[in-house]
Image (tube, rainbow, N blue to C red):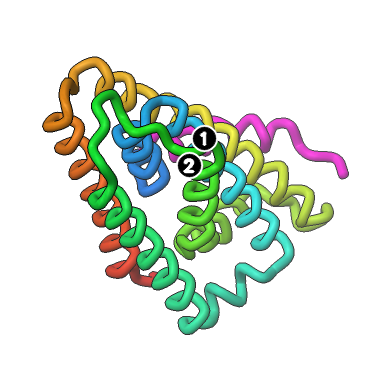
Amino acid sequence: MALDWLVLLTFVPASLALNVTPGADMMFCVGQGVRSGAGAAWKGSAGVAVGGLIHALVAGLGVGAIVAAHPVAFDAIRWVGAAYLLWMAWQILRSKARPGGAEASAGRPFRDGLLVNLSNPKVILFILAFVPQFVDPTQPVLPQFLIFGAVLSLGGLIINGVVGALAGRLQQRFVRGARGTRWMQRISAAIFAGLALRLILLQRS
């Protein structure tokens, strides 16, 4: 497959402009950083990035069009995602406050980022709306979706990771004592609960 480099060079700044726009993925990474520090933010961002690649694969295979066309599938995915985010918020609130940020297990932020991204049907609808503008229909479609999806995911990995890590560094620098840490936990839980509400109120259009 011969990819037009001019098209790719046009896609990169467009995708970066979208990556720097605050959204659910960025807020998730901020929540991870506030809750468990910079390392968790980067792991969460990696999970989000892998989820984006899977969405690109699904869209390229044509499955995404099924989700876009069937409200039941769309609603099922978003309700699962909202429930998972609310469960995360509850787990944060019930956890013991530890000054300096609670250390998350090695795989948990990555897993959470992956599941949160995959359970957001808006991501695949966005890919279906945005990526085809750059796809050459005379060439194999799936490899193009994967390449463009990789560009989007890489940009998101870096930007979301940096923003989440900065939030984690600020939390560790300025928060002292169990009381301050407890407030950071509440802020983190509020972020995840807010993302859940955003999914609940999400419309297909």
- Image side of residue 136 versus residue 83, left or right: right
Query: Within the image, what quadrant is residue 141 found in?
Result: bottom right
Q: Main secondary structure of the magenta part?
A: helix
Magenta residues, as a range? 1-21
Circle 2: is it few (<14), some (14-19), or many (20+) Cα within 10 Å?
many
Nearer to me, 112 or 106: 106
Residue 140: percent from the left, percent from the top?
A: 83, 55
| Position of residue 26 measured from the top left corner of the image (x, y, whole percent) | 38, 40
Q: Residue at x 56, y 74 (%)?
A: 67
List x then y, in percent, for residue 32: 37, 38
Mark linked to residue 43: 1
Q: Does residue 5 show up magenta in the picture?
A: yes
Quarter residue 1 falls in: top right
Question: Mark 2 or mark 1, which is nearer the start of the sequence?
Answer: 1
Q: Which residue is mark 2?
A: 109
Label ID, residue 146: none
Residues packed near mark 1 inside 10 Å, few (<14), some (14 to 19) or many (20 plus): many
Instruction: From the top left corner, tell me how far across and down residue 116 is, in percent.
Output: 46, 55
Q: Which residue appears at 37% of the width and 44% of the height?
A: 28
Instruction: Say which amino acid is labelled 2.
Output: Pro
Quarter of the image for the C terminus: give it: bottom left
Determine the secondary structure under disc 2. Answer: helix
Using the image, determine if residue 170 lies above or below residue 33. above
Q: Residue furthest left?
A: 179
| Horizontal side of residue 155 vs 62, given as left or right | left
Instruction: Name the residue at the right extreme.
Output: 1
Q: Nearer the viewer, residue 178 or 109?
A: 178
Q: Nearer the viewer, residue 181 or 139?
A: 181
Can residue 125 be seen by looking at this rendering? yes
Disc 1 residue type? Lys
Q: Are marks 1 and 2 in contact (CB under 8 Å)?
A: yes
